Image (spheres, grey):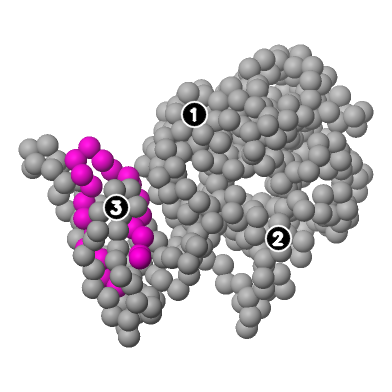
């Protein structure tokens, strides 16, 4: 069975590789995650009062886009509307439950898109399909779906070209007719180059739910390689993940991932050709918190070491063992090697194991050398072309250095 060729928009999406996810809305004022209305059973009338305190005074679309660029991210997906039904964009009379009708007094999605365009970042819109605010979601589903399509049409027509639409919530009514042909058809008319993504949730990672879907999702779980043989179209893959255990701001959450974990997760996504969409939860006023910003910039420093390889490198025939893997880029093979030790005196270095031979299979062409990209150190290797087996003596890091995942180039 053959593997279909990706359509240009999907190929471009895969080369974006790494993006920022933003969960921000009224729930951010409470600082207990994005599901607080549902989890705490807050009555709608009470929850709606949060709108009166939503100033968004520190929200700056360009500053956020610049942070993303500094972090090595090439796109941002923002919650234009989350499950609480509050919209960050101007709903143009569909509802008064939106940012222009709050103390913010402005279309925050317009600010976001303008900032992204200025910094060379591709804007994507998250949009809920589940809605705790609209009564029609429960008692007039056809009417609700018409409202949903009108809402999404505003996003497709009022902000210029966008990277895509990222939907979330169909899992709330698994047996319902969501009239997806009408929704996706409308998007294709207005934004033919936009990606269409619909999150299948924690229980159905990697599933394709409709012929127009351009990428499957892996929520909070490392993606597996997709078997695209015999598929009617090529679909990409994207892992979305939080730095902690929730998507919106959490005042009392101190359990954040380290830059090391983020680098490892980004590498795990690229190992199988998937994108990595990493979430941040801005403050109530719209600022990216300090720890998240610092961690993202640190990962960005690592990405700068490897340039376009992280974005455009693709998995090929060469396979590593364990976490190690290879990508092919611009006619060459690059080895991504994990868990190396730091070299140094035993009185100052705790871990001395980890360096040594690493095996890769599937390399059936002659090579002349192997070198680390970060310092050009030449590595000893043994290679059997007939068996396709390469064994590289992966040296440890110089003292004061640890790249988490180190890359060697085959020459």
- Looking at the image, do the residues carrying marks 1 and 3 touch, with CB atoms under 8 Å apart? no
Q: In this rendered view, identify the residue nearer to me: 185 or 383.
A: 383
- Looking at the image, do the residues carrying marks 2 and 3 touch, with CB atoms under 8 Å apart? no
Which label sits in the foreground, 1 or 3? 3
Q: Check the image and report above or below for 70 versus 11.
A: above
Cα–Cα span, label 2 and label 1? 32 Å
Mark 2 or mark 3, which has the lower sequence index? Answer: 2
Which label sits in the foreground, 2 or 3? 3
Horizontal side of residue 173 vs 273, given as left or right: right
Residue for badge 1? 293
Which label sits in the foreground, 2 or 1? 2
Q: Residue at x 8, y 42 (%)?
A: 346
Residue for badge 3? 376
Cα–Cα span, label 1 and label 3? 31 Å
Q: Which residue is drawn at 91% across and 45% down?
A: 146
Residue 265 visible in the picture: no
Disc 1 on helix, strand or loop?
A: helix
Q: Which residue is drawn at 60% across and 25% down?
A: 63
Q: In this rendered view, identify the residue nearer to me: 199 or 318.
A: 318
Disc 3 on helix, strand or loop?
A: loop
In the rendered image, residue 118 lying in the magenta stretch gets the answer: no
Horizontal side of residue 131 vs 62, given as left or right: right
Q: In this rendered view, identify the residue nearer to me: 334 or 171.
A: 334
Query: Residue 377 placed where, x, y %?
Result: 25, 54
């Amino acid at each position: 069975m053959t593997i279909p060729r990706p359509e240009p928009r999907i190929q471009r999406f895969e080369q974006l590789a790494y993006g920022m996810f933003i969960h921000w809305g009224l729930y951010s004022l409470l600082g207990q995650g994005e599901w607080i209305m549902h989890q705490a059973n807050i009555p709608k009338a009470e929850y709606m009062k949060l709108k009166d305190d939503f100033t968004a005074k520190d929200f700056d679309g360009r500053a956020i886009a610049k942070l993303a660029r500094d972090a090595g991210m090439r796109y941002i997906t923002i919650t234009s509307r989350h499950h609480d039904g509050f919209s960050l964009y101007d709903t143009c009379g569909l509802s008064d439950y939106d940012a222009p009708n709050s103390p913010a007094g402005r279309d925050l999605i317009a600010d976001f898109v303008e900032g992204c365009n200025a910094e060379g970042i591709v804007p994507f819109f998250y949009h809920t399909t589940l809605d705790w605010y609209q009564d029609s979601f429960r008692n007039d589903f056809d009417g609700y779906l018409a409202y949903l399509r009108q809402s999404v049409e505003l996003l497709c027509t009022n902000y210029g070209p966008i990277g895509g639409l990222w939907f979330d919530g169909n899992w709330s009514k698994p047996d319902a007719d969501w009239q997806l042909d009408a929704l996706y058809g409308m998007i294709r008319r207005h934004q033919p180059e936009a990606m269409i993504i619909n999150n299948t949730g924690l229980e159905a990672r990697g599933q394709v739910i409709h012929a127009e879907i351009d990428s499957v999702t892996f929520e909070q779980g490392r993606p597996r390689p997709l078997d695209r043989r015999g598929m009617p179209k090529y679909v990409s893959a994207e892992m979305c993940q939080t730095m902690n255990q929730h998507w919106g701001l959490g005042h009392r959450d101190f359990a954040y991932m380290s830059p090391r974990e983020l680098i490892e997760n980004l590498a795990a996504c690229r190992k199988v050709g998937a994108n990595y969409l990493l979430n941040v939860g801005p403050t109530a006023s719209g600022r990216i918190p300090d720890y998240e910003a610092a961690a993202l910039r640190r990962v960005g420093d690592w990405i700068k070491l490897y340039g376009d390889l992280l974005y455009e490198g693709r998995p090929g025939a060469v396979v590593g063992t364990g976490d190690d893997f290879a990508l092919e880029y611009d006619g060459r093979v690059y080895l991504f090697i994990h868990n190396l030790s730091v070299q140094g005196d035993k009185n100052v270095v705790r871990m001395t194991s980890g360096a040594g031979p690493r095996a890769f299979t599937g390399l059936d062409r002659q090579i002349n050398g192997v070198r680390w990209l970060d310092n050009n150190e030449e590595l000893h290797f043994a290679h059997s072309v007939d068996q396709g087996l390469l064994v590289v003596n992966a040296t440890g890091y110089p003292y004061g250095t640890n790249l988490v995942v180190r890359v060697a180039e085959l020459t």
